[in-house]
Image (tube, rainbow, N blue to C red):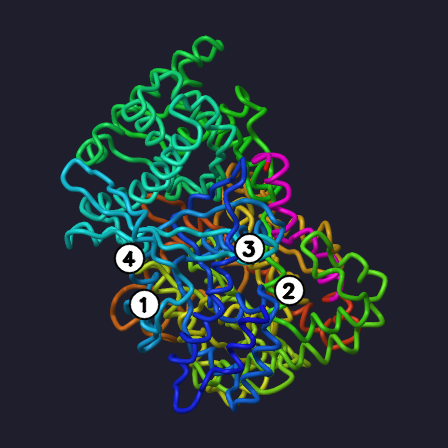
Amino acid sequence: MNEFLNRLKELDVTGKDVVTLYNEISALAMEQAEKRIAPHAKRNAYYLSIEYLLGRAFFNNLMELGVLDEVSRILSEKGVDIRNFEEIEDAALGNGGLGRLAACFLDSAAALGLPLYGYGIRYKYGLFKQAFQDGRQTEMPDDWQKFGDPWSLRREGEKREIAFADYTVTAVPYDIPIIGERVNVLRLFQAEGSPQAEKISEYLYPADDTEEGKLLRLRQEYFFSAAAIGELTERYAKEHGKKFDDFGACNVIQLNDTHPVIAVAELIRVLTVQYKVSFDRAAAIAKATFNYTNHTVLPEALECWREELVRKILPDIADILVRLQRMQTKELKARGCSAKEIADMAIYRDGIFYMANLAVYMGTAVNGVAALHTEILKNTLFATAYRIFPEKFRNKTNGVTKRRWLMLANPELSGAIDGVIGTAWRDPREGFGALKEHIDALTDDFIAVKETKKRQLFDYIEQKEGVRIPDRFLVYAQVKRLHEYKRQLMTAFAVLELYHAIKDGALSDFHPSVFLFGAKSAPSYRRAKAIIKFINDISALVNNDPATKDVLRVVFVQNYNVSYAEKIVAGTDVSLQVSTAGLEASGTGNMKFMMNGAVTCGTMDGANIEIVEHAGKENNYIFGATVEEIDALKASGYDPNAVLAQNSAHNRAVSALIDGTFSDGGTGEYRELYDALTVGASWHAPDHYFILHDLSSYVHALVQINRDYGNRAMFARKQLQNVANSSFFSSDRTIAEYAADIWHI
């Protein structure tokens, strides 16, 4: 990198704005990164994902290239503060955990020197920019390219045509180097051609509540999957000829959830039509190539497509899916399966294609993303398939990259760790285990670091939100996608109960605390948007009450993204991971907080279970019903109204939705939230996420945390036990397991 640093020293910064300097410095670094892009290996893994939530590239890539500190020094000598580049916005080409996990996985594979390549879509606009007006979420287009895109390389000579029944689209690849011990590539395809064609890569997750929206979503999924398959088969034919006997030995494809599962049918189509491989042989090749990661048990994320929609734009794919169903039925009958078992696993049934069933049947391996989640897949969601194909199922607990989420987000803590155990932990093959023997030696420095990171976070919030949080506040944070099962609404009720208790004098000696929320709701998700409004109403009440504002604050940050997350995870004391047990597959936010020294206040759900196993239940705060208890409640006839009748504090908090404490502007949204808890709806029972059942134990846990925090040294040791035991939750470990157990790279 000496060439880059020398050219940077020669760079004239006179009169140049931040955006100009960002593009010029990035271009200089990109020249070096491009030179280091590794050639394909003999066997390569490919990760197909509808989204990649990469975050800001500038600081991360300079760190990965090993020159971040030197660049900061050189720029400082030129009178430029490197922090100015924080105004360059994130490439928000993802929605949440699914996309961020994909980014962490690519980072870890590069760090470990493994040949893993990503495929996805280069959206013109990110998810959306979120702002609040009168407490309500508003959405604006996220033009992430307005600052330029110096970290992408357009590969004009490698574009290809993707054909639908009604029109053809040009897929133009853009390569983003993923920098590590090996420099791999994330290839994102941009749709070009007619205005109609260009809509395919315009927005991430277009609304699919109309037939037109559903067709656009299907086009997106086929577009990037077909572009990837076309490229891989073409490269194989050039290198190995057209027999394709060894295609699965050279290429392994990981399907990140159900969005890219259509690639299975596309590979069979290409092999049979373009290369004249027999259908049975093509299906066998596909089975040797694909693996499937399931990320959720929620039915809305297990994609199903009506046959008529698929036939409308992809008739050949529809034919292949029907034919695969016949093949599956024949095989299952030969294995002695009953009609019910065959129906449970059906790829095609009653005019509907079931993409998760396709992935399970055709995949060599099927994995969940946390130990509990994988057991749920085996015992409920894919129970029949597990009985027939037990060898397919395995667990790969998620992880996060320590480079972005500790070394970049928290250099102060990283330096403190260096001072105690040395720097070996920074290697992707090493961890923090040695820290367990040095907790006491690090406690004072850790407390000082945490206060520094809080001050940085509070300053950032003041800059972004115009809200000043006083020093020394205890920080509770719940930042993640807004969904009812993640139970941000339960936290809102808990905060109201704390507010009332403090105001009424029932809760004394409460250490000053702030509850941070960050989340985007899907634009058409009415209840989720109502929850955002409700939390913002609570914020206005609590923050402006002279009786409470010095001890309790609530802030819902706007446009939560990776860059915001980097500051929040470093400055938080308590990670709120409160989903209904059995519904959060894993979570990765919980791991980022743990790595930065936050205790987990959460349910026994997803990776929380493993966090507690590794860091100790005594160093975290677990509350609420378990999966088994939830099942028992469902069986016995859970009555949330009885809970409200027996607990006046709960009733007061929940009644705030309808008693005039807050106004929803006459929309009826708050009444609808209240009815969802007390009456239910045509499609669910009252309080189907068991908010009211878990609320009492949740409030108790929050108060206990607050009291424990009074002994700052003791609490810091709990936090440090989480840091010291977070190595297991590094995506370096996860990717090493994928490489050894599934991909064989």
Secondary structure state at the residue bearing disc 1 = loop
Q: CA distance from mark 3 to mark 2?
A: 39 Å
Indicate the amino acid at tag 2: His
Q: CA distance from mark 3 to mark 4?
A: 25 Å
Q: Mark 2, residues whose alpha carbon is within 10 Å: few (<14), some, or many (≥20)? A: few
Q: CA distance from mark 1 to mark 4?
A: 9 Å
Name the residue nearer the viewer: 70 or 656: 70
Indicate the amino acid at tag 4: Tyr
Residue 563 percent coordinates (x, y): 49, 70
Quickly name the residue at label 3: 107
Residue 51 percent coordinates (x, y): 40, 52
Q: Which tag is nearer the camera, tag 3 or tag 2?
A: 3
Q: Residue at x 35, y 65 (%)?
A: 530
46 up-or-down from 459: above or below: above
Q: Which tag is nearer the camera, tag 3 or tag 4?
A: 3
Secondary structure state at the residue bearing disc 4 = loop
Q: Residue at x 27, y 73 (%)?
A: 665
Q: CA distance from mark 1 to mark 3?
A: 24 Å
Q: Mark 3, residues whose alpha carbon is within 10 Å: few (<14), some, or many (≥20)? A: many
Quickly name the residue at label 4: 203
Q: Earlier in the sequence, mark 2 or mark 4?
A: 4
Q: Residue at x 56, y 75 (%)?
A: 5
Magenta stretch holds residue 235: no
Quickly name the residue at label 2: 700
**Which quadrant is the C terminus positioned in?**
top right
Q: CA distance from mark 2 to mark 1?
A: 40 Å
Name the residue nearer the viewer: 216 or 371: 216
Magenta stretch holds residue 738: yes
Residue 571 percent coordinates (x, y): 61, 74
Question: Residue 142 has which mark?
Answer: 1
Residue numbers of the magenta segment = 720-744
